[in-house]
Image (tube, rainbow, N blue to C red):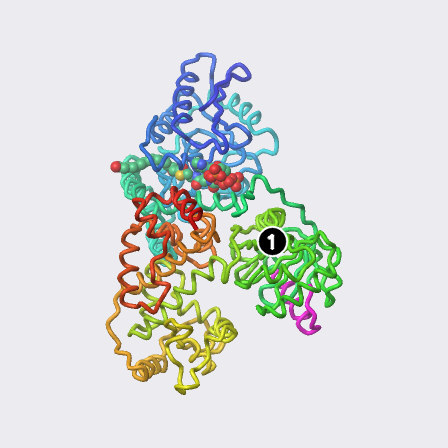
Amino acid sequence: MAQYTRVSGSVGLITLQSPPVNALSAAVRQGIVDLMQRALSEPEVKSVVICGQNGIFCGGADIKEFGGQMSGPPLIPMIHAIEAASKPVVAAIEGIALGGGLELALGCHYRIAHSKARVGLPEVTLGLLPGAGGSQRLPRLIGVPAALDLITTGRHVTAAEALKFGLVDQITDHNTVNVAVKFAQRVADQPLDARRISTHPCLCPSDVAVLFEEVMQRVRRTARGAIAPIACVQAVRAAATLPYNQGMERERELMATLFTSGQARALQYFFFAQRAVGRWSMPSGARWDTSKPRPVHKAAVIGLGTMGRGITVALAQAGFSVVAVETQEKQLMEAKQAISGMLERGAKRRGVAPALDKINYGRNIQSVADVDLVIEAVFEDMALKKKVFQQLSAVCKPSTFLCSNTSGLDIDQLACQTRNPELVVGMHFFAPAHVMKLLEVVYGPKSSPLAVATAMQLGKKIGKVSVAVGNCRGFVGNRMLKPYLEQALFLLEEGATPEFVDQVLEEFGFAMGVFRMSDLSGLDVGWKVRLADGLAMPDPTMGQPTRLRQGRRYSPLGDLLCEQGRFGQKTGRGWYQYDKPGSQVAKPDPWLHSFLDEYRARHALVAHRIDHQEVLERCLYSMINEGFRILEDGIAAGPEDIDVIYVFGYSWPRHRGGPMFYAATVGLNKVLERLEHYYQAHPDVPSLQPCHLLRKLVASGSPPIQKWREVIKKVRSQL
Ligand SMILES: CC(C)(COP(=O)(O)OP(=O)(O)OC[C@H]1O[C@@H](n2cnc3c(N)ncnc32)[C@H](O)[C@@H]1OP(=O)(O)O)[C@@H](O)C(=O)NCCC(=O)NCCSC(=O)C[C@@H](O)CCCCCCCCCCCCC(=O)O
C-alpha cells in the first residue's frame, strides 16, 4: 500500500507502507501507480517525492511473491512511467534502497539519501539480476566498472560511497523527507530530459571489452556453478553495447531464465532460512519469543589456541570487554601478539581503531571471577574440559554463563561439573572464529532457555548466524560430516582417487572437496578422536588393520596416513602432496596412488570404475540421511537449521540451498530409492540405511520442505 499527502502546497508525497521493509508487493505497486497518476493530474502539484514509512525507503521486490502467481501492476512499466513523468520525481532514501527499491529510485529524476542509508542491488544473492531496469540504468548513471562491481557482488554501499559514485544527488543528516520536499520545490520547473537515466549514453572505459572478459573470468572462477553472477555480467554488457530498449529486452530474457531456475528457488529459500533460525525453539517448548536473554557486558575466553584467539578477536571487535586466559606464559605471549595483529589488520580494513584496550590478558583462572559469560576454548579433551568447568564453577559468580567451544563433546557431562548446570551451553565456533559466520549454540538437557537466549544474542552481536541445536555427538554439523567422510574413504577403497572425488564435489559447488578439506583441517584431528574412541587401532590378531570395527564397515585409510606422519597441509603430505609444509597448493601424489593399490591388494579389493553419480549420491545422500535422523531425534528443529549450518559452516554451495533443500529438489523418493540401493550393496554401512523420517515423508507424498515440520512433529510424537 501507499499513502498520498500534499505537502508545502505543491509537492505530492507518496509514502510506501508495507512493513517491515516496504517491499514492492502487488498492493504497493498498485498504490504507486494510482498515486503517481493522482499527483500528475493535480494542477497544484508541481513535483513529487517518494519515500517509505518508518525510516525505510524500500527493501525491493516482495520476495514472498516470487513463488506464486504474480499479480498487480508490473514493476518495469511502473518505473518507466515515473521516469517519463512530466513533473520532477525525487526519491527520499532513508534506511535502505535495495534491489527493486533502488531500481524505483533510479527511475526517479533525483535521489536524496540520508547519510546513514545503504543502497545496493543484491538480486544476485537471490539468484536473480536487477530485472526492473537496474542492470541498464545503473551503468548509465555510475559507469560500467562500478555498476559491474555492485551488480555482480550485490554488496550494499553507504550513502557516502553512493554520492561518490554519483548514484545519489545529495546526502543529508537531517530529516530526509523534509530535505527532499524542499529540493523538489526548488527543481519543480527544471527541464527533465537530462534527468531520465534511460536516455543517457552508457559510460564505458576505452578497454571495456577487456574489463568484461576479466570480470567474467573472475565471476566464473568464484561462482562455484552459480548462474546469476554470469547473467549479471551479460546484462551489464548489454547495457554497454546495445541501445537502451534492446538492453532492456536482453535484461528481460536473462531474468526469465533466472527467475524460474532451481538456483533462484534455492537462494530465496535460503534467504528465509537464515531468518528462520533466529526463531529457535527447544523440545521443552521454550522459544525465542518467550525467552529473554540477559545482557552480557564482560566475557572471558579460556585457552588461547587458534580457536580461543579468534573468539577473543570476535568479542573485542564487537565491543565486549574480554578477559583472555592462557595458563602457560609462553603461549600467552604468543597469543597476545597474534590477537593484537589480528585486531590491527581487521581495524585497518574497516578503517577504525583496533580494539586492543578491550582485552585484559591473564594466566590465572581467578581473573574471570566477575565476568558475565565464559567461553572455554581449551584443547578438545573431555577430561581437561571437565577440570576447567569445575574450576570455573568454583571461581565465577553464580550467575555466570559457562559455555564450551567444543566441536562435538557432550555438553551435559560438562554441565554436571558445575553448580548451575542450567547456565551451561555449547558455543561451537568454526575456524577462523573471527571470520566464519556460523555458531552452533548447543543446549543440553539441563540448559535453561535463558542460557540459550543469551548465547544466541551474543552470537548475533558478534556478527554470527547462530543456530540452536540439541546435544549429541558432533551436534548437527560434525555429526552429518561423519557419514560423508566415511563414504569418501570407502570410495577410495573401491577404486576412486582423492582427486576424482574432490573434483566431483567441487563441480557440485563445494569450495573444497572432502580430501582437500581434510588436508587443510589436519588429518590428525580426526585420528585423535578415533584413537580415543578405540576405532583407530590396528587389529592385533591380523597384524594389520581390518576393515570392520564395532560390527560395521570401517576404513582405516586415514589412520594409516597419520601413522606415516601425513597430517595434511601442515606436514606437506596428506591425501595430496604439497611443495612444503604449510603450502596450500595440492598436487596429486603418486605415493598415495601406489599406497591405495597396495592397500586394495592387501585386502583383496578389486578396484572398479566409480562414476560421478555414485560419488555424489553416496557422499551426499548418506549425509542427508543423517540430517533426517537429526530431525527425527529433535537435535535440529527444522531443515532450515541444518541448511544454514551447512552453507555457513561447511561451504555447501548456497545456490543449492543446503543439504535438506537439495534432497527436496532431487526428490525425496529418489533419495530414498538410491539409499536403499546402496544399502543393499553395503549392508555393513548403517549410515546408508534410509531412516524412518525419510520413509515417512515419502509415504506422506513428499510434501514441500516448508511442510516437513508437520511430519517431523508426528514422527517425534510417535517415538
Ligand atoms: C532489508 C534488509 C536489509 C533488512 O535487514 P534486517 O536485518 O533489518 O531485517 P531482516 O532481514 O530480518 O528482515 C525483516 C523481515 O523482512 C523480510 N524481508 C526483507 N526483505 C524482504 C523482501 N524484499 N521481500 C519480502 N520480505 C522481505 C524478512 O524476510 C524478514 O521477515 P521474516 O518474517 O523472514 O523474519 C534485509 O531483509 C534484506 O537484505 N532484504 C532483502 C533485500 C533484497 O534482496 N532485495 C531485492 C529483492 S529482489 C528484487 O528486488 C528484484 C527486482 O530487481 C526486479 C523484480 C522484477 C520482477 C520481474 C519479474 C519478471 C519475471 C520474469 C518471469 C518470466 C517468466 C516467463 O517469461 O515465462
What is the quadrant of residue 689 in the picture?
bottom left
Residue 202 percent coordinates (x, y): 36, 40
Relative to 189, does residue 567 appear above or below in the rendering? below
- In this rendering, does residue 167 appear at all? no
What is the quadrant of residue 102 in the picture?
top left
Q: Residue shown at 55%/59% (left/top)?
A: 429
Q: Which residues are magenta?
A: 325-344
Q: Quadrant of the N terminus?
A: top left
Most foreground residue, 45 or 521: 521
Most foreground residue, 470 or 180: 470
Most foreground residue, 398 or 618: 398
Relative to 318, does residue 308 appear above or below in the rendering? below
The overriding secondary structure of the stretch rendered in magenta is helix
Relative to 4, does residue 396 appear above or below in the rendering? below
Hey, what amino acid is under mark 1?
A: Lys
Residue 345 percent coordinates (x, y): 59, 60
State yes or no: residue 560 in magenta.
no
Residue 379 percent coordinates (x, y): 59, 69
